[in-house]
Amino acid sequence: MTGLAGDDFPFAENVLAGRTALVCGASKGIGRASALMLARAGARVIACARSAEELETLLDEMHGSGHSMLVLDLEDVEAVRETVLGLGMVEIVVNNAGGPPGGPLLGNKLDEFEGPFARHLHAAHTIAQILSPRMEELGYGRFVNIISTSVREPIDNIGLSNTLRGAMASWSKSLSRELPSCITINNILPGFTDTDRLGSLAGSISDKTGKSVEEVRTAWMDSVPIQRLIDPLETAAAVTYLCLPSSSAIRGVSLAVDGGRMRSI
């Protein structure tokens, strides 16, 4: 394999050997890239998503052995609880799930908040409640949440997503003050990343605003100094670093991987 998860891997060989990582939303995009990178770092990866077929393809591409897949709908919080209770020891969790459709916030009905909040905040909290005591017993734990730059600068026409990501960021920061010293929790704030999610989001915004998909994408690119979409493996490299033993002093941080798009410090 070539690229960051192959010949250009930026970390020491087997730096996460002996660790087990649960990667949610692993079938596509940043979740998939994170699973590949963590496996390349030597971790045993439990790849979680709704699509068994896509997870099987991912497992075939992973470096190393001992990886497994978990077919699970994160919106079913009770199923999440029962499944995670049976996982055993897990030292690394990547909380990642698909975002809600785009559009103005005032156009969202209350029931449209339920699914996104369940698969993001409720699932992540359930996982943390179960696994953090086990991490403390092992003396090592890493939670990395994939959220959005919108927690610092709301993005136009994705109001529900902005609201959800802000809740996740506050949850994470609060937990960073409560978790044992051996466990860290941090957020990754992806910018405009070359994923299926970005394509569907452009289409959703187009449908709700009347702008063409090309107009939506052009406006996005005009706001990014690097003038390109970010490779999911670039984001996954940041995820992997936050899972390393050497990242133990980084706690409660929201790290942007956005190509310089945000104007805030």
Image (tube, rainbow, N blue to C red):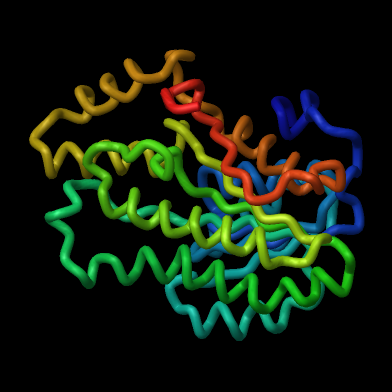
Residue 76 seen anywhere in this rendered image of the structure: yes
133 sits left or right of 49 in the view? right
The answer to which image quadrant residue 149 occupies is top left
* Nearer the observer, 118 or 182: 182
**Extreme residue in the left direction:** 210
- Residue 262, image x, y percentages: 43, 27
Indicate the position of residue 56 as horizontal and vertical percent values: 63, 58
Q: Position of residue 183 (x, y in %)?
A: 77, 60
Report the quarter where the N terminus lies.
Answer: top right
Q: Residue at x 27, y 19 (%)?
A: 218
Say which quarter of the image contains residue 254.
top right
Instruction: Give the left or right position of residue 130, taking residue 225 as reference.
Output: right
Residue 54 shows in this picture = no
Q: Residue furthest front?
A: 177
Note whether 9 is above or below 50 in the view shown. above
The residue at 31%/43% (across/down) is 200
Residue 10 x %, y %: 79, 28
